[in-house]
Every structure is written in C-alpha cells, then in structure tokens.
C-alpha cells in the first residue's frame, strides 16, 4: 500500500530528547512537528520526517527539548532593588523585622510610587526579559507595590504594556492587599474598604487582572480582612490566589480552600489542619516557593512530600521579587525544590511546567503533546536528571513561542 502523502507543517524541530513524563511521549522521541502555533506530533525524527513536509527544519545539537517554563507566582512590577535589605538579612535581621522597620514591601512601594508609568513599564520589560532568558514564556505576575488605587492601576497597565513588548504571556493578578500602606497604618480596615469599594471594581472595569491575591500574615492582613477582600474579588469574577502560612498559620489556608482559591502559596508554617483542608479540597493548589526560605533564612520549608502524598495539587514557582526571592530562574527554583523539599528532578520540572499551568487553568501549556501550544525551550542538559542540579548556569539555549523562535534579548 502506498504511503500517505506527507502533511504540511510549519516547523520540524529535531535532534534533542523530548522530555516525556511516564507514558506521555513515545520512548526515544527526539522531534516535534509544529503547525499553527501548536504541537502536531511528537516522535522519532525519522518517523516525523516521513509523516510531515515541514516548511522549516531546525536540527538541534543534543540536549533536551522541554515545555517552556510557566512561572505561576511572580512579582515583576517593581522599580528598584533592595540590596541594603539583603545585607541586613545576611547580618541576622528577619524578614518581618525588616518589614516592621519600614523596609520590605513598603520600600518597594515608595520606589513604584515615585516612578511614572513609562519608567515603570521599562523596568517591567527588563524584569520580564530576565524571566524569558531563563526559559519562562508564561507567567502569573502580581501587582502589589503600588498600594493606592492609582499606583496599582499604573502597575497593572505597565505590566500589560511590558508583556506585549517582551512577548511573554502574562496572567495578571491584582495584589492590592500585599501590605497595609503607611497612610493607613492606624486604620487597616479603611484600606480594605478602599480595596473593596474602589480598587477591585476599577481593576475589573479596565480588565487589568484575572485574579486577586492577598498576603495573610501578621503585620499584613488578618483572615477577616482577607475574607472581605477575597469575597468581593470573587463576586467581581476574579480568580483567587493567596499568600498564607509563610511565617504564621493564621487560618489563611483554610480560608483559601473555603473560598475555592486556585492556589495558596508559601506554606512553610502549614499546620496539620491546613494540610487536611487542602487534602479534602483537591482543588486549591499548594504553591511551593522554595527559594524564599533560603533567601530569608527561614529554617522551615513547606511540607512538600506530605502535600503530594495527600493528593494535593501543587506547583513550583520562583516568587521572583526583590525582597524574599530575587531570582527569575525556574531552573534555580527547581534546584531548591530538589535540595530543600526533596523533589525529584522530574517532579521539579513538572512543577515549573505542567503543574504550574494547571494551577492557572491552562490545560494546553506546560507539556509537549499534540494540541498543546508550541511554547518550547531547548535546554543544554544531558537528561532530566540534571534539571535543577547546577547552580549559577543558565541551561536555556533557545526558545520558541507558539512555534516561532524567540530572539532572547539581554
Ligand atoms: O511572596 N510574602 C509576601 N510577598 C512576597 C514578598 C514581597 C517582598 O518582600 O517584596 C513573597 O514572598
Ligand atoms: Fe509572593
């Protein structure tokens, strides 16, 4: 019987081992066919070369072809570094001590408020490029360093402009409840009123965010305040993500589960009751941010293995921000996920791809399979076992966004 005529396709990428989770990809696959921005097929190069008539072929020189990273928890809308604060931390100050002394998040707030929208957008462009250079083509990105209606709107507008300019898919999250700004220090409930009555409706009206987030912590927001804010956000149609149990278990995890949040992140201080709530929900993801306990010398980590064993959905993210986790690199987050949380290399890789995408409701990203968006990264690694092994080396050699090569800019 004559062979079927080859199907046209836009691109055939060959010559690198296509990362496969058990059972997901044919054994020995070293090629991907792409058409209309999506993966058409994964297999052995010779088979795909017979099946397809590609308009372009790119032959790679070994290494791994992986899904481009999905960073599901980042804070790239900042205007300045906080290197002095890192110095204080290295000399023994705790994250909460630095924050209580007017540093921390509020230091970033002063810098963002002082920047005009154009200047801020230029900063965010730089930050998104740093993320892209480390293999991220999709990210969840939060505001939260403006903390007034005008400065939060400015932050989200700057983020949208920067995303377009860089060519990274950004899922924006409004984090107006990141800290209580100085001018509301004596009346935080009034600030929550402003968030509920003015900021959230304005953000939704302009279509600037898909989710809302709150930091439930001593010195930030109480569970009662977070409940008011999250219920209003949900009523306005936003998805919910929550920072909780970083230093103190105040009940933020249970609240996140009760309100059907997409994710609750940090969890270094997670209690048995919080873990139980997550295990019963099986819907709210646990966001693992393993660089944070390193950066803040916390001495405690999220109980990742217990969460996984309890069937809680989870992901790994960088938490890229100038205070508690100053890295834009998912492979580096993977290093800490392996070293501190005991994840395997494959788990760490899935954590920053497939699981991260799922936490954002993106079923067609974070994996290389027919129908998925062809967001791909070529990694200079001999195998999956080396993912998150080296420190201080960027394994990214090339990127394709929806099947098109991305010129990675410095
Ligand atoms: O996810 N924990 C709260 N928010 C950020 C830190 C922000 C900052 O220090 O600027 C986090 O770690
Ligand atoms: Fe965060």
Image (cartoon, grey):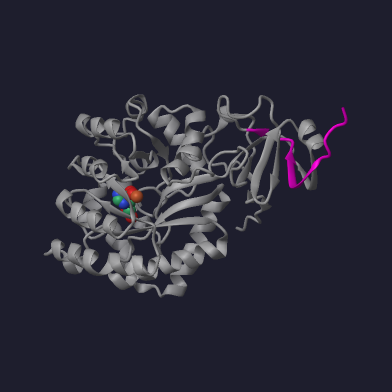
Task: Identify which residue, 295 or 330, lies in the foreground.
Answer: 330
Query: Does the magenta segment cover residue 396?
Result: no
* Looking at the image, residue 190 lies above or below residue 395: below
* Looking at the image, residue 215 lies above or below residue 273: below
Residue 370, position as x, y percentages in the image? 63, 39
- Residue 46 visible in the displayed image: yes
User: At x 21% / y 48%, what residue is drawn?
Assistant: 217
User: At x 38% / y 38%, what residue is drawn?
Assistant: 290
Q: How many marks?
A: 0
Residue 337, position as x, y percentages in the image? 42, 34
* Quadrant of the snapshot with the N terminus: top right
Task: Identify which residue, 60 or 40, lies in the foreground.
Answer: 40
Q: Is residue 44 left or right of residue 184?
A: right
Quarter holding residue 233: bottom left
Quarter holding residue 143: bottom left
Q: Residue furthest right?
A: 2
Q: Is residue 392 left or right of residue 343?
A: right
* Looking at the image, residue 340 lies above or below residue 158: above
User: At x 49% / y 58%, what residue is drawn?
Assistant: 127
User: At x 48% / y 33%, what residue is drawn?
Assistant: 348
Which residues are the magenta region? Answer: 1-18
- Residue 398 visible in the displayed image: no
Task: Identify which residue, 116 or 284, lies in the foreground.
Answer: 284
Q: Residue furthest front?
A: 1
Q: Is residue 44 left or right of residue 362?
A: right
* Looking at the image, residue 82 lies above or below residue 203: above
Residue 196, position as x, y percentages in the image? 22, 64
* Quadrant of the snapshot with the C terminus: bottom right
Quarter holding residue 228: bottom left
Residue 116, position as x, y percentages in the image? 41, 75
Query: Does the magenta segment cover residue 13?
Result: yes
């Amino acid at each position: 019987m004559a062979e079927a005529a080859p199907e046209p396709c836009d691109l055939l990428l060959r010559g690198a081992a296509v990362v496969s989770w058990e059972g997901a990809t044919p054994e020995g696959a070293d090629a991907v066919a792409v058409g209309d921005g999506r993966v058409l097929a994964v297999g052995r190069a010779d088979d795909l070369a017979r099946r397809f008539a590609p308009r372009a072929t790119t032959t790679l020189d070994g290494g791994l072809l992986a899904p481009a990273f999905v960073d599901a928890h980042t804070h790239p809308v900042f205007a300045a570094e906080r290197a002095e604060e890192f110095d204080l931390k290295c000399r023994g100050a705790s994250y909460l001590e630095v924050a209580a002394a007017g540093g921390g998040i509020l230091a970033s707030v002063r810098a963002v408020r002082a920047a005009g929208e154009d200047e801020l957008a230029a900063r965010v462009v730089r930050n998104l490029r740093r993320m892209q250079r480390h293999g991220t083509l999709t990210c969840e990105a939060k505001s939260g360093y403006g903390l007034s209606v005008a400065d939060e709107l400015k932050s989200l507008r700057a983020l949208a402009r920067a995303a377009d300019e860089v060519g990274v898919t950004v899922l924006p999250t409004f984090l107006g409840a990141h800290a209580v700004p100085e001018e509301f220090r004596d009346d935080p409930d009034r600030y929550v009123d402003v968030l509920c009555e003015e900021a959230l409706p304005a953000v939704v009206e302009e279509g600037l965010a898909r989710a809302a987030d709150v930091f439930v912590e001593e010195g930030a927001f109480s569970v009662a305040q977070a409940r008011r804010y999250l219920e209003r956000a949900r009523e306005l149609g936003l998805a919910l993500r929550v920072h909780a149990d970083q230093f103190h278990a105040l009940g933020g995890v249970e609240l996140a589960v009760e309100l059907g949040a997409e994710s609750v992140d940090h969890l270094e201080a997670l209690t048995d009751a919080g873990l139980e709530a997550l295990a019963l929900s099986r819907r709210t993801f646990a966001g693992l941010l393993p660089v944070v306990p390193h950066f803040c010398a916390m001495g405690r980590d999220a109980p990742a293995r217990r969460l996984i064993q309890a069937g809680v959905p989870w992901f790994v993210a960088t938490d890229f921000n100038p205070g508690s986790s100053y890295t834009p690199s998912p492979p580096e987050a993977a290093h800490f996920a392996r070293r501190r949380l005991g994840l395997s290399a494959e788990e760490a890789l899935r954590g920053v791809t497939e699981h991260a995408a799922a936490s954002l409701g993106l079923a067609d990203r974070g994996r290389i399979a027919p129908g998925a968006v062809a967001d791909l990264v070529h990694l200079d690694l001999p195998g999956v076992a080396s993912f998150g092994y080296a420190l201080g080396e960027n394994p990214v050699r090339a990127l394709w966004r929806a099947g098109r090569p991305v010129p990675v800019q410095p």
